[in-house]
Image (cartoon, coloured by chain):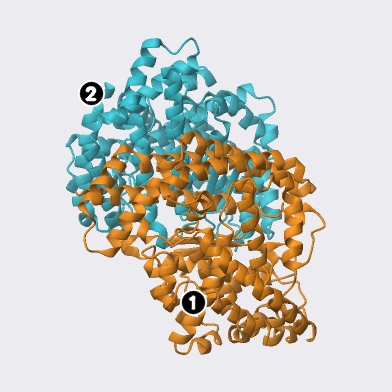
Chain colours: A orange, B cyan
Amino acid sequence: MTAYDRLAARFARIATVGEASAVLGWDSAAMMPPGGAAARGDQLAVLAGLAHGLLTAPEAARDLAAAEADGAGDDPWRQANLRLMRHAHTRATAVPADLVEAQARANAACEKVWREARRTKDFPAVAPALAEVVNLTRQHADALAPALGLSPYDALMDGFQRGIGAADVAPVFDAYLAFLADALPRAEELQASRPPPERPAGPFAAEAQEALCRRLSAAAGLEPEHSRLDRSAHPFCGGTPTDVRITTRYREDDFAQSLLGVLHETGHALYERGLPADFARQPVGEAAGMAAHESQSLIVEMQACRSDAFLSALGPLLLESFGGDPAPYATQNLAAMWRRVERGFIRVDADEMTYPAHVILRFRLEQALLSGDLAVADLPGAWNDGLRDLLGIVPADDAQGCLQDIHWYDGAFGYFPSYTLGAMAAAQLMAAARREVAGLDEALAAADLRPLVAWLRANVHARGSLLGFNDLLRAATGKPLDPADFTAHLTARYLE
Amino acid sequence: MTAYDRLAARFARIATVGEASAVLGWDSAAMMPPGGAAARGDQLAVLAGLAHGLLTAPEAARDLAAAEADGAGDDPWRQANLRLMRHAHTRATAVPADLVEAQARANAACEKVWREARRTKDFPAVAPALAEVVNLTRQHADALAPALGLSPYDALMDGFQRGIGAADVAPVFDAYLAFLADALPRAEELQASRPPPERPAGPFAAEAQEALCRRLSAAAGLEPEHSRLDRSAHPFCGGTPTDVRITTRYREDDFAQSLLGVLHETGHALYERGLPADFARQPVGEAAGMAAHESQSLIVEMQACRSDAFLSALGPLLLESFGGDPAPYATQNLAAMWRRVERGFIRVDADEMTYPAHVILRFRLEQALLSGDLAVADLPGAWNDGLRDLLGIVPADDAQGCLQDIHWYDGAFGYFPSYTLGAMAAAQLMAAARREVAGLDEALAAADLRPLVAWLRANVHARGSLLGFNDLLRAATGKPLDPADFTAHLTARYLE
């Protein structure tokens, strides 16, 4: 057995423990009775510790050095796999174990205080806990940075989307803000000139919503023998590549949340299903990062399923599912409902044009928090000033402002940019698919996502982590990330 | 940190990995889409390997020796815990790893062939695979025996019910057969002299069955915040002590299977819920073995819930749930339906009087298989001869005979006696509870199992594995296993 083969076996075990944790994580959200929570936390912590132990064992370091000395041969997949093994090992060994433990405790404690602080709109109540999280995250970033040869903030970003740093993102975001300053008022003006959409009258039975969600998800190619759809308080896609599990929630007064949510999660799920089976449980066989993942959910939900073509097929399905007055299910009415711009306070409710502004605000603030340029105590003011600058609105309280997202309070810094990089990549991939896939719009007009998904499978899913984010886009679309496709999409959809 | 404390931390990690495996095992049966099966097998194997590695690590042996040299202090719980740690370590280290692996492969292969062989009633098709399983099991038993100071067969029995061997069981079983030879014809005669029971007319909606199952399970004290009830092909109780998960299946033409099955699994679940929280995840905090566990399911299902008192309360609940003609729900009719003796071929369908005969047949045959006195090829003939001797009937084919149970084909030898030991212990515990719990029958007549369960909690559940099977019975009932309570129960129920 070569050193590379031993490493491949080790990483397969690590990934298999990760699969067990993923199923337990899904169970926590979708199935577990509340009394199981404490034990579940222990189970996940022990599994994480065992996986970390496998990754940081002395034998892993020896095999890495030996395999790098041998070279991984001519196969670019094996070469990339070995590089990614080294990268994972570097990330795992660069940070002292006691810091990781201190972060786990501080993040859990802060998240708990945050839930109450958000409820009571009381930022000062959580400020000390957040300050500790920021302090430990800074130490974590400082430990990672030299090992990765990155700036501290980029070392955090690298944990979510490898190879993308602040210098890649900042100019793209600045250019977007210039676009937005012009586009948003024009889109609002155009929207105001048209009649408001007619809302379909509910209630919409949860069972009928669920049946339609299953039908659309299966029609997109998600096989029932390899997936589940369940309910949870917060929709997500979890599980493993051969057993993907998506969740949603049903509001009987509004089917849009479950329907569009399940289509979004189906995009994530199809990515996992399409990963290269030959490299299952190897680093190179994993999804290419959070921005890449978000591109796959958004190309399904935002690009394909909110298109005129798809909406024209969806309307009759909605009428069949829910009955009642057919008028609200007309294509142009669905478009008016689900393609509206609105300056709002809440990121997760934002439309696709203003969403990047929410991300850019957080991208700027989290860098300032970590560098020390912004004190935690000054976060609410900086948030409100920033949102006024970007969207011209100021939240009435911090629950609508800097308390709205769990991310920072749970120690996730450097994640937010992935959402907007994903949205931009989705537009770029859709533009390429439109050029390359004959009959794409005709298929969408029959609610058939399979031609699009087949193209994504070949050009994105099946490539796993062989390529970095920009190289993946180059291979699929002929160019690295180019936000022009996103602004062109928004222009066509909201300004014409 | 003392050696004992280090061991306690190690065993807590091992148990926590076991909890993760238990939830994944439940998921496999109750939730997993079929396409996830292969990956799930890997996940469970990797977790088992990690747990085994923690148990057999050199540090564990060193700490065990040091803790034994120190002594575990005056606390009998700590003393018992240390003894049980040694016992687990001895079992884990006595068998070579390559034999364990060969068994895992052979058992899995044989079980697969068995499923098809049972379907096609073709014992010769599975005989070679079973011969390999028997051969490896024999090697396993031979490796365990000297380490435990037991005979090879007793070393296998010890894996299911510690401290009970063939010499304890054989005379009890022989005496039972003497009882049965007299009692069974008399019970049949008495039964034949009475009118046959009237079967309630279905269909019985699965939702109504499930609602009643939940109601009865909760009324027995199983808290919804620490449990789930789901569906699976084969009912079982799984999960963890703070998150117990029971399953059943619903037949719309017969509610008895789900109802009595859920009461049975509720007995198992209540045992897990009642284990001593102070020793959670320690060997001494676990249930006392498979026979002890079966005593808890059977005292609920067979002793309490098939009593006249409970049936008198259940009848009105059944009528409320399913409606229709009230006559079949009269106490005496329910008793006639659910307390019938019948010489049958299938163990899991057997009544409580003939069930031990099925177990005794297997107990004898598995010893003969392992000793080599019985060749695998001769199993069908020996089975049929044995069943004729015991019950006077001969199965028409091997699917009704030696192919019916999964146990041997999956490598489980030494397990069967636990079922009957559990039935006997259940009768003995019920007799003691009747003496000690005031108002027990009045509570049962109100479908209230809580007084019985409170007594079981104090006298069985809360003792964990502090005592062996006979000592546990002695502490709870004043005597070690005494089958006289079981035969007295059968006499009262079937011969009077």
* Image quadrant assignment for residue A333: bottom right
| Residue A34 percent coordinates (x, y) | 63, 44
Q: How far apart are labels 2 and 1 at the CA level?
A: 67 Å
- Quickly name the residue at label 1: A429
Give me the chain letter of mark 1.
A
Name which residue lies at 69% across and 45% down. A375
Which sits in the foreground, B480 or A494? A494
Q: Which disc is residue B146 wearing? A: 2
Amino acid tagged 2? Pro
**Above or below, comparing residue A317 to residue A388 in the picture:** below
* Badge 1: residue crowd in 10 Å (few <14, some 14–19, many ≥20): many
Q: Is residue B312 visible?
A: no
Q: Is residue B390 visible?
A: yes
Amino acid tagged 1? Leu
Mark toward the viewer: 2 or 1: 1
Name which residue lies at 46% across and 30% down. B12
Name which residue lies at 72% across and 42% down. A126
**Above or below, comparing residue B45 to residue B464 in the picture:** below
Which sits in the foreground, A146 or A387? A146
| Residue A20 percent coordinates (x, y) | 44, 49
**Secondary-structure class at tag 1:** helix
Name which residue lies at 55% across and 83% down. A447
**Secondary-structure class at tag 2:** helix
Give me the chain letter of mark 2.
B
**Above or below, comparing residue A258 to residue B46 in the picture:** below
| Residue A430 percent coordinates (x, y) | 51, 79
| Residue A41 percent coordinates (x, y) | 55, 41
* Badge 2: residue crowd in 10 Å (few <14, some 14–19, many ≥20): few
Q: Are marks 2 and 1 in contact (CB under 8 Å)?
A: no
